[in-house]
Image (cartoon, rainbow, N blue to C red):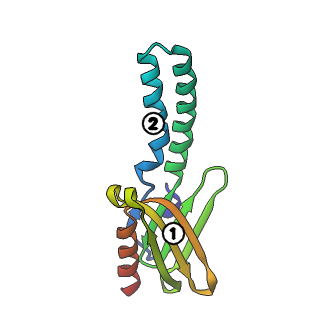
Amino acid sequence: MSYVDKSLIAGETVVYRTHLHWIVFLWPVLITAIAVACLFYGLVHVAEVLAAIALVLWIARYLVYIASEFAITSKRVIIKVGVMQRRTLELQLAKVEAVAVTQGLLGQLFGCGSILVTGTGGTRESFSNIGSPLEFRKALQTASMS
């Protein structure tokens, strides 16, 4: 059972979920491709080193990917990120003042970006590499108006 599902209170339902974007796997993909190219050109020892580095990166990024949750419920915003050091945000919808979305050119092309959730009392939490950040913001705005 996920962190979000365990955190739900009576009468609360999840209205929107997203996760980290696949772009978090970009470096492992690139290093794997370079390792394959080195193997193709006969640089076996270089390919072995790069493959080992790629494997470690694949595992690390996968753990971060599966450990990250982003949800909007009927009552709150619930976000959890991190493997070794967990960071969570649980903020009532009524306490959310703004959600800022930042997307570079690649983020706009591939549908990923960063969000900054600002709550009353000065709470400011930033989260990077979110899949569909504009949809997250729209779902949050829609839920807070309900």
Q: Is residue 61 left or right of residue 145?
A: right
Q: Position of residue 105 (x, y in %)?
A: 38, 60
Mark yes or no: residue 33 visible.
yes
Considering the numbered disc 1 on the image, is that residue within a helix, a strand or a loop? strand
Which residue in the protein does label 2 denote?
A: 30
Q: For residue 121, which quarter of the picture? A: bottom right
Q: Nearer the viewer, residue 146 or 137?
A: 137
Q: Which mark is residue 132?
A: none
**Image: 64 above or below 108:** above
Drawn side of residue 127 relative to residue 71, left or right: right
Quadrant in which the C terminus is drawn: bottom left
For marks 1 and 2, give the CA distance. 32 Å
* Residue 132 locus on image (x, y percent): 37, 62
Label 1 crowd bin: few (<14), some (14–19), many (20+), radius 10 Å? many
Identify residue type, mark 1: Ile
Determine whether 132 is above or below 57 in the image. Answer: below
Q: Quadrant of residue 104?
A: bottom left
Does residue 48 lie above or below 11 as drawn? above
Outermost residue toward the right? 85
Q: Earlier in the sequence, mark 1 or mark 2?
A: 2
Q: Residue at x 43, y 73 (%)?
A: 73
The x, y position of residue 74, in whole percent, is 41, 77
Residue 103: % across, % down: 42, 64
Left or right: 27 as drawn, with respect to 88: left
Residue ID for mark 1: 78
In the displayed structure, 54 sits above or below 9; it is above
Residue shown at the point (35%, 80%) measured from the top left: 142
